[in-house]
Image (cartoon, grey):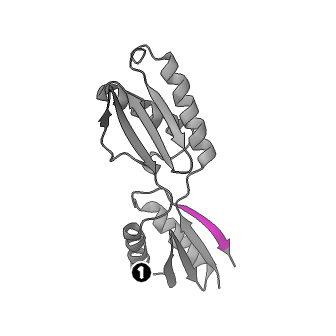
Amino acid sequence: MPSFDIVNKPDFQKVDNAVNSAKKDLVNRFDLKDEECSLELEKKAKTIKLSAKQEMALTSITDILLTKFSKQGLDVRTLDLSGEPVPSGKLMHLEIKLKDGIDKEIAKKIVNYIKTLPQKVQAAINDDQLRVTGKKIDDLQAVIAQVRSQDFELPLQFENFRN
């Protein structure tokens, strides 16, 4: 039976490139010269840690990071920007998490949306991804097009399309 998976996997090589490019920009920025700014990617924890003297500098670093993400072709919805800056000594720290995988609530929204479509397909949640199966390949392709047209607060990829 034909099937495909709906996943959310950021390309960590592109993320690393965007962070390194943002680090180079921090060195050249005149307005951030005396702010003791830093930007670090922790691959295992899937977080980006920012630090600076002032909260205004943190917002500037975040803006630089967002532009570098878009230049690398990454979706900025991959970043969880809901964190608040935390003061620690003379510096402010901000931790930005990378969204990897599909949360249960969003997965349920996607499954409910797929159930409302006229195509005869089944969607099942497997850990942090969705598997969609159907009898006809045309139905699966139509589901992919419909899901792409919706905004589920995550950049979704479609992979493992099998006959």
**Span of residues in magenta:** 157-161
Residue farthest along the front direction in this orientation = 89
Tell me what residue is drawn at x 57 percent, y 30 percent: 21
Q: Where 62 falls versus 35 (above or below)?
A: below
Tell me what residue is drawn at x 61 percent, y 83 percent: 136
In the image, 57: left or right of 76?
A: left
What is the x, y in percent for residue 104? 40, 70
Q: Quadrant of the N terminus?
A: bottom right
What is the x, y in percent for residue 90? 32, 25
Q: Label 1's element?
A: helix
Closest to the observer, 79 or 73: 79
Closest to the observer, 90 or 38: 90
For disc 1, the neighbor class at 10 Å (few under 14, some 14 to 19, many from 20) is some
Does the magenta-highlighted stretch encompass residue 104?
no
Query: Amino acid type of disc 1?
Result: Lys
* Rendering quarter of residue 37: top left
Q: Where 123 falls versus 17 (above or below)?
A: below
Q: Quadrant of the C terminus?
A: bottom right
Give the main secondary structure, helix, strand or loop, of the magenta stretch. Answer: strand
Tell me what residue is drawn at x 30 percent, y 42 percent: 84
What is the x, y in percent for residue 124? 50, 80
Q: Where 157 falls versus 31 (above or below)?
A: below
In the image, 12: left or right of 80?
A: right
Does the magenta-highlighted stretch encompass residue 160?
yes
Closest to the observer, 155 or 118: 155
Q: Where 70 falls versus 118 (above or below)?
A: above
Tell me what residue is drawn at x 30 percent, y 29 percent: 55
Per the image, the residue denoted by label 1 is 115
Closest to the observer, 105 or 96: 96
